[in-house]
């Protein structure tokens, strides 16, 4: 499906491009290793990983999908190949691509490691109509990466552009002119649009809203009263009128967290403690890296029934891993009853900038901060967890991957666990 305005010289008052490097990690592996081209592959978190982070289109054709266990993928896909993730490589190529795209339009929002929005409204006089800029974007990604293909969606707003980008994968280009956006989205289920999760979808379904056209029967004020400004934005999104501008930079973090998938149905406390220790150390190190402390933390494990979790408040705010680990110990003592666990998560929910130069701390805290600073300096120079608690010194079994909120600079630059 390819929508076009049939007028190559047409300029739009609002023009947004969403570029999506399809199956990005797999594309990099197939680019770097020609023997993998055309093969069904899946990326896992290290050689010991059992959960598929992403898979190639060859594997998707057999029904393999993100989040599937390796055993199931091998059962349904003949010749399926496991490939351990190389997050540093993916981050380097992504950074190269994003830098190149910024020369097309400085009005760019890096949405994730493999997606970016470009506001090209101001570029048209110099670079031509949206269709020409979109083709230039595709070539730029190919040249900057050395061989990675992408799909591109073009429209007058972010939501419609993102929807357009997924209509032709891989290596597609779909244009939905702003004047046709409402008509194009009319029959689309509202939950197909980015940002409308299942909970909001249920709320809308209870009110007879299933497609974007149905939304016109729901007063914008009603969804606004329930969800505030995000609700009003959702109403406009379904009409091809998403008002959200392309955001030029990553704002202050609302949370800083790390999570990790464990072997299915893990019940041994010592194993769960090790995973939580790993996450506590990473959260604390990342808080310190960007001069944040937090006083509210989330600790959770995912069990068969969903997330089992608890929130902890501490005073004063902390960036110290043992403080966070003490919360984890309390969680296991008082909120976990031996259920099989599949994943752990620790999140600092209220990170705030801490001026280490003027903080008046007790001598013990000052000594602790100096030790943390020395350890962080060594780990940044010689590699993460060069200095670490004994249980984490063999952390090769717990490799890193890139989190969805990754950015090439700032507090989201860190390669995370998931």
Image: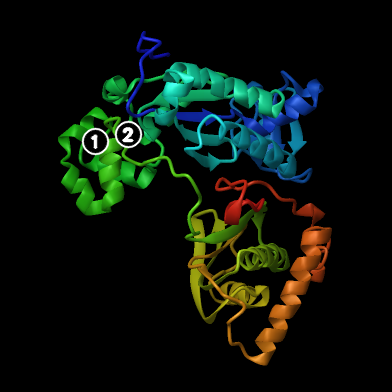
**Image location (x, y in percent) of residue 347:** 55, 63
Depth check: 404 or 12 in front?
Answer: 12
Give the colour scheme shown.
Answer: rainbow
Quarter holding the N terminus is: top left
Query: Which of the two discs, 1 and 2, labels the residue nearer the N terminus?
Result: 2
**Image location (x, y in percent) of residue 241:** 29, 33
Depth check: 188 or 272 in front?
Answer: 188
Residue of label 1: 209
Q: Is residue 194 left or right of residue 236?
A: right
Question: Quick check: 270 above or below 77?
Answer: below
Q: Quadrant of residue 37?
A: top right
- Residue at the front extreme, as displayed: 126
| Element class at badge 2 | helix
- Residue at the top extreme, as displayed: 6
Structural crowding at the residue carrying mark 1, measured as other residues with C-alpha within 10 Å and reported as few (<14), some (14–19) or many (≥20): some
Tell me which residue sits at (65%, 23%) in the image.
Answer: 142
Task: State whether residue 40 appears in this view.
Answer: yes
**Image location (x, y in percent) of residue 105:** 50, 32
- What is the distance, in whole Å, between disc 1 and disc 2 at their CAs? 8 Å
Question: Quick check: 302 above or below 191?
Answer: below
Residue of label 2: 190
Tell me which residue sits at (66%, 62%) in the image.
Answer: 267
Q: Quadrant of residue 392?
A: bottom right
The mark tally for this picture is 2
Question: Quick check: 187 above or below 322?
Answer: above
Q: Is residue 90 left or right of residue 195?
A: right
Q: Is residue 383 left or right of residue 72?
A: right
Q: Is residue 213 left or right of residue 369?
A: left
Q: Circles 1 and 2: CB distance less than 8 Å?
A: yes
């Amino acid at each position: 499906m390819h929508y076009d305005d049939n007028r190559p010289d047409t300029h739009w008052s609002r023009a947004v491009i969403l570029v999506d490097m399809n199956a990005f990690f797999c594309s990099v592996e197939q680019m770097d290793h020609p023997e993998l081209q055309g093969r069904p592959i899946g990326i896992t978190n290290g050689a010991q990983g059992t959960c598929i982070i992403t898979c190639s289109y060859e594997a998707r054709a057999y029904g393999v999908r993100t989040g599937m266990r390796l055993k199931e993928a091998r059962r349904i896909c003949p010749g399926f190949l496991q490939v351990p993730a190389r997050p540093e490589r993916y981050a380097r190529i992504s950074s190269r691509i994003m830098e190149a795209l910024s020369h097309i339009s400085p009005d760019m929002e890096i949405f994730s490691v493999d997606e970016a929005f470009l506001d090209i409204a101001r570029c048209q006089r110099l670079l031509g109509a949206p269709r020409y800029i979109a083709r230039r974007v595709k070539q730029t990604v190919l040249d900057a990466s050395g061989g990675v293909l992408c799909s591109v969606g073009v429209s007058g707003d972010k939501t419609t552009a993102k929807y357009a980008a997924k209509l032709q994968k891989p290596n597609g280009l779909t244009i939905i002119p702003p004047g046709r956006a409402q008509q194009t989205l009319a029959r689309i289920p509202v939950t197909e649009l980015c940002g409308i999760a299942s909970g909001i979808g249920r709320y809308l379904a209870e009110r007879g809203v299933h497609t974007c056209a149905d939304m016109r029967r729901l007063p914008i004020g009603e969804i606004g009263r329930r969800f505030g400004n995000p609700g009003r934005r959702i109403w406009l999104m379904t009409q091809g009128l998403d008002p959200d501008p392309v955001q030029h930079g990553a704002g202050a973090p609302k949370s800083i967290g790390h999570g990790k998938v464990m072997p299915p149905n893990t019940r041994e406390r010592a194993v769960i403690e090790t995973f939580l220790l790993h996450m506590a150390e990473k959260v604390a190190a990342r808080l310190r890296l960007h001069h944040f402390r937090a006083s509210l933390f989330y600790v959770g494990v995912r069990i068969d029934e969903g997330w089992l979790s608890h929130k902890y408040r501490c005073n004063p705010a902390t960036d110290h891993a043992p403080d966070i680990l003490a919360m984890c110990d309390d969680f296991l003592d008082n909120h976990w009853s031996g259920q099989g666990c599949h994943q752990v998560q620790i999140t600092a929910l209220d990170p705030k900038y801490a001026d280490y130069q003027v903080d008046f701390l007790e001598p013990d805290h000052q000594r602790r901060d100096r030790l943390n600073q020395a350890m962080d300096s060594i780990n940044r120079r010689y590699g993460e967890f060069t200095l670490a608690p004994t249980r984490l010194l063999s952390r090769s079994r717990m490799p890193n991957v890139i989190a969805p909120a990754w950015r090439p600079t700032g507090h989201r630059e860190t390669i995370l666990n998931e």
